[in-house]
Image (cartoon, rainbow, N blue to C red):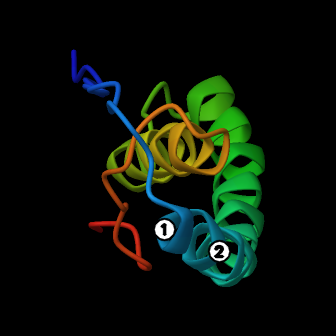
Amino acid sequence: MESVNVQITPGGRASRTEVIIRIFYALIAGIILAIFMWIASILVFINFFSCLILAKRVGVGFISKVIAQKAKLSAYAYFVTDERPPLMPEV
């Protein structure tokens, strides 16, 4: 079984410029992530029928990486960490 590990390190003191950059960066990364989440939701639908009929999972690696990216972006956007996630999920 493949597992998803997301490690988030809380940041210390935040700089003011990073707060301004964070708003725009999170907005752009969120739009890109929304496209990947849409593709992942289609894969979940296909995966349901694949598991039901063939007893095989399809695209779970992609789905797990998109979910991990969502967790990283959420931590960054909610000011938990200063570590910027990549714009594109590591697919």
| Image position of 45 with respect to 5: above or below | below
Q: Amino acid at mark 1?
A: Glu
Q: Quadrant of residue 24?
A: bottom right
Q: Amino acid at mark 2?
A: Ile
Whole-percent x, y for residue 49 in the image:
72, 39
| Image position of 52 with respect to 28: above or below | above
Left or right position of 18 against 38 = left
Label 2 CA crowd tier, 10 Å (few <14, some 14–19, many 20+): few
Whole-percent x, y for residue 43 in the image:
64, 56
Name the residue nearer the viewer: 32 or 10.
10
Q: CA distance from mark 1 to mark 2?
A: 5 Å
Q: Are marks 1 and 2 in contact (CB under 8 Å)?
A: yes
Badge 1 marks a residue whose secondary structure is helix
Q: Residue at x 42, y 40 (%)?
A: 68
Whole-percent x, y for residue 85 in the image:
37, 61
- Which quarter of the rendered picture does the C terminus lie within? bottom left
The residue at which mark 2 appears reads as 20
Label 1 CA crowd tier, 10 Å (few <14, some 14–19, many 20+): few
Badge 2 marks a residue whose secondary structure is helix
Left or right position of 71 against 81 = right
Q: Quadrant of residue 19?
A: bottom right
The residue at which mark 1 appears reads as 18
Mark seen at residue 59: none
